[in-house]
Image: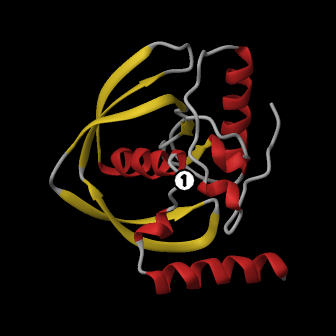
Amino acid sequence: MALRDILTVPDPRLKLVSQDVERVDDALRALMDDMLETMYAAPGIGLAAIQVGEPKRVIVMDLAREDEPPQPRYFINPQILWASEETAPYEEGCLSVPDIYDEVERPAQVKLRYLDYQGETVEEDAEGLYAVCIQHEMDHLNGVLFIDHLSRLKRDRAVAKVKKQKAA
């Protein structure tokens, strides 16, 4: 396993639409292992492959609390099959937009389908933090950042702040 660099705004690669994964093999599992290690080190709770410069439809996530053992999750070619009309606000942050947090309104529940670490198909329902996180990470796969859900002014301020931090 290896730590990878996390892309930050305004890197244009973050706007790429990721490609479907053709097969789950050892090379893909090695990428997911690297992504998980990178996410833990950041620290974060979710990471999309594009955030480490790999335009593949792959996400890793771990929503375990600090007092719980790690619960890594792997999502390959995830799809949202259904989203509730009911929405819920949640304050989001992003490893690609460091130190910026803002409220985003998303569907409160979703039903999803994806391939797991072994390449098996999984269908399940998500709500709460899980629903927020999977939608946030799936946005990355489509070239969308959480700040794209904010007003233009807030988005521009966020990008400017990250640029300033990088320059310092």
Q: Position of residue 148 (x, y in %)?
A: 47, 68
Q: Position of residue 150 (x, y in %)?
A: 42, 75
- The crowding category of the residue bearing disc 1, from other C-alpha atoms within 10 Å (few below 14, some 14 to 19, many at least 20), is some
Q: Position of residue 120 (x, y in %)?
A: 47, 12
Q: Residue at x 69, y 61 (%)?
A: 12
Q: Is residue 161 left or right of residue 128?
A: right
Which quadrant would the N terminus be assigned to in this image?
top right
Q: Which residue is mark 1?
A: 143
Q: Residue at x 49, y 29 (%)?
A: 77
Which coloring applies here? secondary structure
The image shows a total of numbered marks equal to: 1
Q: Amino acid at mark 1?
A: Gly
Give the vertical position of 102 relative to 88 (above or below): below
Q: Most extreme residue toward the left, as rendered?
A: 85
Q: Position of residue 3 (x, y in %)?
A: 80, 42
Which quadrant would the C terminus be assigned to in this image?
bottom right
Q: Is residue 96 left or right of residue 103?
A: right
Q: Residue at x 41, y 16 (%)?
A: 121
Q: Residue at x 72, y 46 (%)?
A: 52
Which structural element holds mark 1?
A: loop
